[in-house]
Amino acid sequence: MKIKQKNCGYITIIGQANVGKSTLLNKIVGKKISIVSRKKNTTQNNITGIKTQNNHQSIYIDTPGIIFDKKNNYIQYSKNSFHEKIRISTLIILIIDRIYWTKHDEIILNEIKKNKIPIIILINKIDKIIDKVILLPFIDFLKKKFDFVDIIPISAKKTNNIILLNNIIKSHLPHQPHIYPEFYITTNSQFFTISEIIREQLILFLGDELPSIIKVEIESCEKKEKITLHIRAIIWVENIRQKGIVIGHNGERIKKISIISRNNIEKEFHIKTHLVLWVKYKNLKK
């Protein structure tokens, strides 16, 4: 009996902050593995999502949004620079916000095309474009920028054209063995997933008050008597003022964050959870 050839490859998702990279990744893999919010740079680390369909395995890397210095437009790369991820990629997905092509998008494109790796450009949030007719001249405009594999208008939130994107990606995957078991959808560790669940609630509850360099550290995570998960986590901020913001009046804010985080951890891991949160401060910029 003839054995079917396996196909596998990495796809790096790149774009400015808040263009919908994490939303796209979650839709593709069919599960929320990357937190989403309107706050810039919600994604602080590279998140890996895996989609296996019979003989095709696509490994997606959701990179932190690229931020620019207003003074000189210099790209402020995070510690998880996308350059090393691009080097191992089969494809690059560049996401832009609707029909807004900015000088920052131009800089990103010029940077990534140096790698000579095929690029798919996604025009995201088309559900917010009332007159879809304006998409055609914009697509023609993009075609003059670079020889893209394809230019696809999508709505990552409402799944418009996600199937089309999936089929195009599958057709470009090289012949090689799968890297992960077929049931894998992410490489996120349990500690990382828990810290992201907590950080998501911090973002939702604090909004613009959230210190941009806030960190969540899982101090301990133990399963006791095989029925309860006991977690101690530290929320690190920079100073005592930020600590007060996170804790809230009479501790009400941190209490709500803890309750919802605990509920979400229980849903994720299907186990009763006891969660203790501590808020501490130190200079996180060092």
Image (cartoon, helix red, strand yellow):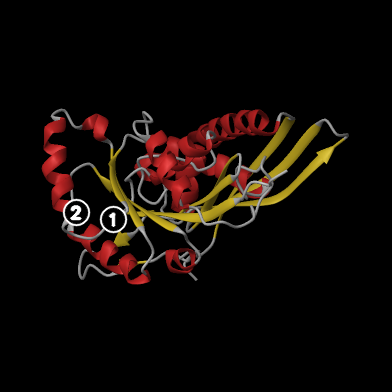
- Residue 112, image x, y percentages: 34, 65
Residue found 45% across the figure and 52% down from its top:
172
- Residue 106, image x, y percentages: 21, 61
- Residue 164, image x, y percentages: 38, 37
Q: Quadrant of the N terminus?
A: top right
Q: Earlier in the sequence, mark 1 or mark 2?
A: 2
Q: Secondary structure at mark 2?
A: helix
Quadrant assignment, res 118: bottom left
The amino acid type of the residue labelled 2 equals Lys
Above/below status of 21 relative to 89: above
Above/below status of 181 relative to 261: below
Q: Which mark is residue 143?
A: 2
Residue in front for this viewpoint, 107 or 245: 107
The amino acid type of the residue labelled 1 equals Phe
Residue in front for this viewpoint, 260 or 78: 78
- The residue that label 1 is drawn on is 148
CA–CA distance between discs 1 and 2?
Answer: 7 Å
* Residue 95 in view (yes/no): no
Residue in front for this viewpoint, 263 or 66: 66
Left/right of residue 92 with respect to residue 225 in the rendered view: left
Residue found 54% across the figure and 37% down from its top:
254
Q: Secondary structure at mark 1?
A: loop
- Residue 170, image x, y percentages: 48, 46
* Residue 18 in view (yes/no): yes
Left/right of residue 110 with respect to residue 190 in the rendered view: left
